[in-house]
């Protein structure tokens, strides 16, 4: 008898639209809400998710904020809610500012490591 299992990181984007005026760059944009998580897969079937974090990224400059988990859960359930500045904690600044994050153009993988190639899909950063 054999088992095929693995632990990987995942990302889920939510269909959430809220128009904003960015406090970082001053332009109009919208919030893109997504969740990152770690998942255990058995025989390539995701069976258990943990380490869930909710994030908001602005469409204008790409600034990333961590979202209050309770608000993130409400958005995941499909509830209509307005994200307030008190729900956000800034993680990184957007384009044109110094950031410690690299983001893959191909798959969207984000890392703080000094990789030349994406560890998820192999595309050059």
Image: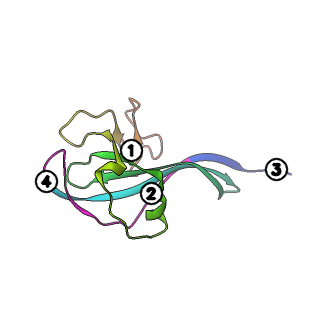
Residue sitting at x 47%, y 40%: 119
Q: Residues within 10 Å of mark 3 (few under 14, many from 20)?
A: few
Q: Do the residues labelled 4 and 3 touch (CB within 8 Å)?
A: no
Q: Is mark 4 on a helix, strand or loop?
A: loop
Residue 106 placement (x, y as % from top left): 37, 51
Residue sitting at x 26%, y 40%: 93
Indicate which label's residue lies in the foreground, 2 or 3. 2
Indicate which label's residue lies in the foreground, 4 or 2. 2
Q: Sequence order check: which comes first, mark 4 or mark 2? A: 4
Residue sitting at x 40%, y 32%: 115
Tell me which segment is drawn in magenta: 9-26
Closer to the camera, 100 or 81? 81
Q: Is mark 1 on a helix, strand or loop?
A: loop
Residue 98 placement (x, y as % from top left): 23, 33
Q: Sequence order check: which comes first, mark 2 or mark 3? A: 3
Closer to the camera, 76 or 62? 76
* Residue topped by disc 1: 123
Q: Sequence order check: which comes first, mark 1 or mark 4? A: 4
Q: Do the residues labelled 2 and 3 touch (CB within 8 Å)?
A: no
Residue 48 placement (x, y as % from top left): 66, 54
In the drawing, what numbered circle is on residue 72? Answer: 2
Counting labels gives 4
* Residue topped by disc 4: 27
| Furthest residue toward front | 86
């Amino acid at each position: 008898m054999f088992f095929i299992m693995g632990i990987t990181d995942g990302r889920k984007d939510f269909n959430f639209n809220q128009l904003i005026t960015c406090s970082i760059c001053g332009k109009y944009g919208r919030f893109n809400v997504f969740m990152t998580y770690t998942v255990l897969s058995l025989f390539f079937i995701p069976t258990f998710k943990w380490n869930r974090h909710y994030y908001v990224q602005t469409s204008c400059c790409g600034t990333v904020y961590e979202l209050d988990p309770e608000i993130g859960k409400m958005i995941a359930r499909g509830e209509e809610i307005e994200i307030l500045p008190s729900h956000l904690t800034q993680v990184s600044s957007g384009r044109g500012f110094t950031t410690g994050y690299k983001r893959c153009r191909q798959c969207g993988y984000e890392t703080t490591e000094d990789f030349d190639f994406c560890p998820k899909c192999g595309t050059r950063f």
